[in-house]
Image (spheres, helix red, strand yellow):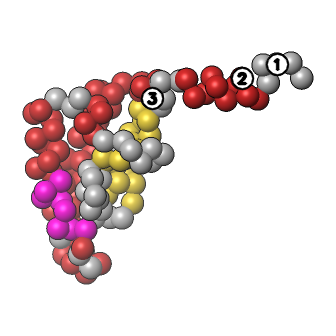
Amino acid sequence: MNEQGPFFIEVLKNNISEESKMKYLTLSADYNSFLKDDYDLSFSYKDLNIPLPLLERIFKWYETYSPIISMSDEERSNSISLINLLDSEGLELTEQLKEIVGEKAKIKYYSEGRLDYLTFL
């Protein structure tokens, strides 16, 4: 084995900047945050420099969606039209976020109302 074995590779890995790492993000009305990196617990939406008008829309969507998280199955069934409306907006917000992050991240949408990942309605 030459001198540039596993140790050298580990040093290279540690020198890769955080910005160059692919992000795997999920938009949802989760209790803790509306945007999470599936593999980086230190991630914050502030890392993305989201334009203020879009950020305000996301906050409003999140605030409206949050009460659905604690609903029972029956309550969710009775609120399906609201859930559909909020999921449509959530998917639209996901698309707008994709445009902002470009190739730096993959973004998916999780419906708290349906308890499932969605790609379209």
Is 67 placed above or below 2 here? below
Q: Amino acid at mark 2?
A: Phe
Q: Is residue 113 left or right of residue 102?
A: left
Q: What residue is drawn where x is 44% and y is 40%?
A: 24
Is 98 placed above or below 28 here? above
Q: To which quarter of the image does residue 106 belong?
A: top left
Q: Earlier in the sequence, mark 3 or mark 1?
A: 1
Q: Which residue is mark 1?
A: 3
Q: CA distance from mark 3 to mark 2?
A: 19 Å
Instruction: Give yes or no for residue 106 being in the magenta stretch.
Output: no
Q: Is residue 53 left or right of residue 1?
A: left
Q: Amino acid at mark 1?
A: Glu
Q: Earlier in the sequence, mark 3 or mark 2?
A: 2
Q: What residue is drawn where x is 15% and y is 38%?
A: 55
Q: Which mark is residue 18?
A: 3
- The boundaries of the magenta stretch are 62-69
Q: Earlier in the sequence, mark 1 or mark 2?
A: 1
Q: Quadrant of the N terminus?
A: top right
Q: Position of residue 77 (x, y in %)?
A: 24, 74
Q: Which residue is mark 2?
A: 8
